[in-house]
Image (cartoon, rainbow, N blue to C red):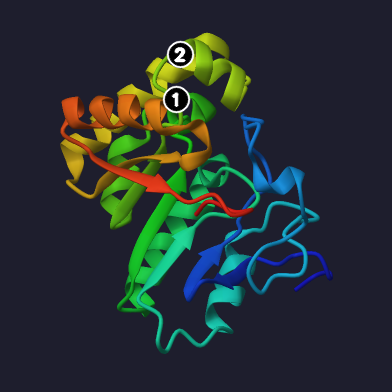
Amino acid sequence: MSNQNQEILYVYKNKVYLNITNKCPCACTFCIRSKKDAIGNASNLWLDHNPSFEEVKEAVDSFNFDGYDEIIFCGYGEPTNSFEVLIKTAQYLRQKLNIKIRVNTNGLGSLINERDISEELCKNVDFISISLNCSNKEDYLKTVRPKFGIKSYDEMLDFAKKCKKYTDNVVLSVVDVIGEDEVEKCRKIADNLGITFRVRKYNGSAT
């Protein structure tokens, strides 16, 4: 690596994660990165720069994947903020390893990239987990604090619906800190869309 602050690959709860960017259009009130610099076996997930595909490839090539069955694009940023690197890396992983590939995303990748990325993303990974986190756009704006404003919530749901057209392996997730009533409202939204629902346990990190 070119410097000491490029922790691209880390392990948490026996899962392998790829930290390919620190950029994110959101500032969630519960975001782990506002509380500490790393999780899992990483010491510092704050990157000096967005890693190139070559840097990510080097991190992948130097890791022993024996015993791991899934690799997840999820770090201290929104992975679709580095979409070209995400896609190239996913394609490389499929060539190199027999391992499932998941993306944890806020669902705003099409806004970030100013084009519909849903089909390309779905065709290059195995699972997509989209953060729902609120049952309405007003609370979403206050809790997730997206830079794109009030339209972000509907865009996120539209992204989920588009992904559902290309793969059944889509999940809408929430963090349990939003409360039981809100969790159940979100569950109904996912059910109405025919998308799997997941509640993530918040214990300093919700992955």
| 66 w.r.t. 21: above or below | below
Give the class, few, some or many, for how many residues have Cα within 10 Å of label 2's Cα (few <14, many ≥20).
some
Tell me what residue is drawn at x 54 percent, y 76 percent. 60
Residue 204, disc: none
Callout 1 amino acid:
Cys
Which quarter of the figure has residue 67?
A: bottom left
On the image, the x and y values in percent for residue 145 come to 62, 22
Mark-to-mark CA distance, 2 and 1: 7 Å
Tell me what residue is drawn at x 17 percent, y 46 percent. 168
Callout 2 amino acid:
Lys
Residue 5 placement, left or right of 110: right
Question: What SS does tag 1 mark?
Answer: loop
Give 174 or 6, whichever is nearer the viewer: 174
| 194 w.r.t. 34: above or below | above
Tell me what residue is drawn at x 38 percent, y 57 percent. 102
Residue 134, disc: 1
Residue 137, disc: 2
